[in-house]
Image: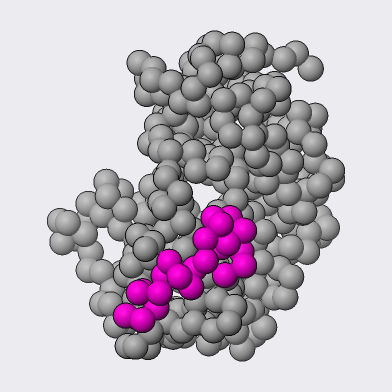
Amino acid sequence: MTQLPVVSARVSNNPVVPNASGAIVNPAALPPADIEALYVHIPFCFHKCHYCDFYSITRQTPERMDAFVDLILREAEFWTSPAAGPKPRLRTVFFGGGTPSLLPANSMARLLAGLKNRFDFSGIEEWTIEVNPATAELEYCRMLRKAGVDRLSFGAQSFNLPELATLERHHDPSDVPRSIALAREAGFTRLNVDLIYAVPGQDLESWAMSLNAALALGTPHVSAYNLTYESNTPMAVKKRLGRLVPIEELAELEMFHHARRSLAAAGLQPYEISNYAAPGEACRHNLVYWTGGNYIGLGPSAASHVEGHRWRNRPHLREWEEAITGGHVPATDVEILSPSQRAGELAMLMLRLSGGLNYAAFAAKTGLDARTVFADQVNRLGGPGLLTADANAIRLTESGLNVADAVAAEFLSPA
């Protein structure tokens, strides 16, 4: 394997250096730490869904996608070269997008093998790839499984054709069970189905139908997200122009609680506000995010976090390509969090978990006693019944879940 020049030799001993295109992150100057998780952003899509604000591009050639693989592998080497700084000791890998399964099979196989050659995968506990139900193929799934991928996530979103049309999803409801069957034939047992509720025009009956259709597939994990109108997406524009009517808040909450009851009754317990799993089937990669772990992201727009230093790659394929070719990763939204900021954000994230803000886990990450630093929040919010505190953790109540974002925001400023 040909190594790139060590990035630290190009930029100085500061972890983040200003650059004409934003900033350059210097891996060798970051704090020493174990990197638990790797995220790879594959930005290619055959169609841009109207609710999606993840960075993606359409109409790319196989040649451009193959060249993209070369550059992802070169970017990976930035994290294997430095003698100092954080060390990838990966437990989880996640390929998101975009549509990762849009990569041609030979390009994907080369990417999987190349990452395994550059990082130590001996400790991998979970390797997830997102797959579009409209494009799933048996041989492609077999290739992924043979390479070591053990978990697939399918974006069903809805089993109702008019709702799929509203979301601008270009697949048929029948594609989802077909894809799940192909994945199982290829040897996958760890499978997830994504659903979206509060879609304009949706009611509780149609949402229940989608939930039942997902449950009928028997996957050990289901994600159920409320539709959000991210700025500058086509759906947000339609909302501003009055071309669609959002679901009322009370109806949205009714859908949320119906999902919690239905999925739990089927053996998929909520372990995070939007995620439900059978015992042992929680998404371990996402748990790294929600518990303040260290992770690196490869590809345009991919986010990274190392001991309070966080950034994302610039969300533009050409700029990203030029940066990697030039031997550095330009970053944007760079932040170096203070200990207080890290503690507040960790508390906010952990409150999303059913296990809540666990005192021992919080202390291990921050050195702080959550019972002391959040005593005021517990007193103010516990009285109205929005959260509860016991000997192990602070947790949202069922009432607190209705205003989870507002409650969590109160924890951003520890005492």
Q: In this view, does 345 lie above or below 83?
A: below
Magenta region includes residue 366: yes
Q: Position of residue 24 (x, y in %)?
A: 46, 22
Q: Position of residue 243 (x, y in %)?
A: 19, 60
**Residue shown at 62% from the left, 67% from the top:** 360
Q: Where is residue 6 in the image (x, y as percent from the top left)?
A: 64, 15
Q: Which quadrant holds residue 269?
A: bottom right
* Residue in front for this viewpoint, 163 or 293: 293
**Residue shown at 81% from the left, 47% from the top:** 123
* Residue in front for this viewpoint, 415 or 14: 415
**Residue shown at 35% from the left, 60% from the top:** 413
**Residue shown at 65% from the left, 61% from the top:** 283
Q: Tell me: 358 left or right of 347.
A: right
State whether the magenta stretch is mostly helix, strand or loop: helix
Q: What range of the chain is rendered magenta?
A: 359-380
**Residue 320 makes an appearance in the image:** no
Q: Is residue 354 above or below residue 18?
A: below
